[in-house]
Amino acid sequence: MAVVQQQGLLCSEWLKKPKKLLIDGNWVDAESGKTFETYNPATDEVLTKVAEGSKADVDKAVRAARKAFESGPWSKMATHERARLLYRLADEIEKRADEFAQIETLDNGKPIKESRWVDVVQVVETFRYYAGWCTKLEGETTNVNSNFFTYTLREPIGVIGQIIPWNFPLLMAAWKLGPALACGNTVILKPAEQTPLTAIRLGELIMEVGFPAGVVNIITGFGANSAGEAISNHMDIDKVAFTGEDKTGKEIVKASTGNLKRVSLELGGKAPNIVFADADLDAAVKGAITGIFFNQGQVCCAGSRLFIENSVHDEFMTKLTERVGKMRQGNGMDEKTQIGPQISKEQVERIMHYVGEGKKDGAKLVCGGERPQGELAKGYFVQPTIFDGVNNDMKIAQEEIFGPVLSVIPFNTMEEVAEQANKIQFGLSGAVWTRDLKRAHKLASHIKAGTIWINCFNVFDPQMPFGGYKMSGYGRELGKHSIELYTNIKSVWVNLAD
Ligand code: NAI
Ligand code: MG
């Protein structure tokens, strides 16, 4: 645990404390007494041990959440008080932004600048945004006819299970908890087994700022045959919200059928990032890099299929490879690092498998494609990798790699690229780089995806909805649309007839 002794580490004492489950306002060991280790992906060192929750713990958490929902202080709390708790939580996270960023980078590997200035900032803003919604949830009155007074109530759904991934651990917790709590639900949150730490720290603050016991329960642990599955098939959970792999999404839908719980899914992507010859090429090069290498390519909306108009292909590729060649890869705790390690050995293997597939299918490897040697060899690093001359039908263009591997697909006409952009099972996002407004808007409406960026990439705000078409999932998170995910509408009929 060499990293724990590092100077200036705000979380070194915290890391040494036991990491337990949050159930009914108490930090408890798993019923089984089991724990699991969480690693620093930059060094392959164990950071700490964490309680391994399973079905018995999920059952306890659901009982606590049910009580808090039906009869506890949560159901009786005024909406402005609920709002105040969420605002207070945002303030407390903001005060500890550096500490949260360090924990995130140690556990996930991402560059500290991104943890601090992207993840944590967005987390704070997400909680603030949803704090505002607490006091703005409304039903409607309607005029059916004079014999009836009719109105609708917007009510929380109840007990919510939230299963989140490892690529943006704290941010995904905020996207899930913010709207669920604003709407008055209670929650069982399961962070990914690779990155449990920031959720635990968040749970501590949730209790410190005064959320009543049982409103937020945090069960660290695994997915299949374990805590994740116990959530998705639980008969007393009213809704599951999931972010992760499409295969897992399907399992969750199947597991939901016992009580037909509501399900919302945010799954994978294989976004087309389309560069026309008339675009600001320097901006597009930067956008292509952000599109695929941000967060080591572990982004569901990553611009992993880069379509470049043939007439500027060579010029673009020269600029792109030059910049990528200068990217600093290293330990995320180093302020100068631009690209960190992947999350796990499994992910490194998956990525290297796809690099092999790309070569086999005849794509041209123009940079990367190896694991770095020397100092970085002990961590889970993969060099930023670019394949040129890719065909949209190749495996590396069709399947989600979830790593720093870019497939460059040259094209000649708008019609051709428009067709290929949609020839994919996913539909999470897409981007278009052009100075031609008509073309930009036409493609924005043509591409079957939940988010389109025009002359930008990876821009986010809690106000803007995010979610998928096709196999990228269903439901929209963020914005007012996630209120739909966490409320039921009830129609009330009052007979006024004499
Ligand atoms: P995963 O989808 O299996 O894991 C995500 C979460 O689901 C974790 O909390 C995990 O414990 C839980 N889980 C796993 N199996 C479950 C089950 N049967 N029932 C309930 N919960 C379950 O993703 P994994 O295996 O970590 O990564 C594999 C691939 O998934 C990646 O290579 C990437 O392509 C994709 N992925 C996509 C993400 C996205 O944001 N869309 C995020 C993470 C992974
Ligand atoms: Mg999995």
Image (cartoon, rainbow, N blue to C red):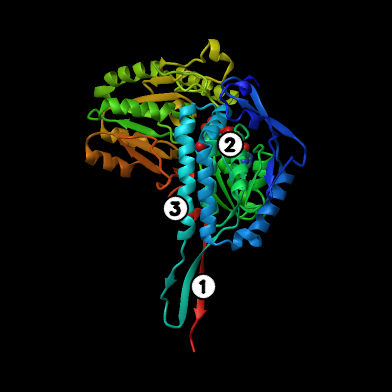
**Badge 2 element:** helix
How many angstroms separate mark 3 from mark 1 (CA)?
Answer: 23 Å
Q: Which residue is mark 1?
A: 492
Position of 248 compared to 434: left or right? right
From this view, report whether residue 330 is shown above or below residue 484: above
* Residue reaching furthest to the top: 374
Tell me which numbered mark, 2 or 3, is placed earlier along the sequence. 2
From this view, report whether residue 249 is shown above or below residue 72: above
**Badge 3 element:** helix
- Tell me where residue 27 sits by quadrant: top right
Given contact means CB atoms under 8 Å apart, are the residues at marks 2 and 3 in contact?
Answer: no
* Residue reaching furthest to the bottom: 498
Single out the mark in the foreground, 2 or 3: 2
Residue drawn 22% across and 29% down? 278
- Tell me where residue 140 sits by quadrant: bottom left
Q: Is residue 471 visible?
A: no
Residue 50, labelled with which disc?
none
Q: Position of residue 469 (x, y in %)?
A: 43, 44
Q: Which residue is mark 2?
A: 198
Position of 188 compared to 483: left or right? right
How many angstroms separate mark 2 from mark 3 (CA)?
Answer: 26 Å
Mark 1 lies within 8 Å of ligand 1 (Cβ measured): no
Given contact means CB atoms under 8 Å apart, are the residues at marks 2 and 1 in contact?
Answer: no
Q: Which residue is mark 3?
A: 481
In the image, what residue type sits under mark 2? Answer: Thr
Q: Position of residue 331 (x, y in %)?
A: 52, 20
Tell me which numbered mark, 2 or 1, is placed earlier along the sequence. 2
In the image, what residue type sits under mark 3? Answer: His
Q: Position of residue 490 (x, y in %)?
A: 52, 67
The local crowd at label 1, few if under 14, some if 14 to 19, many if 20 or more residues have their Cα within 10 Å, is few
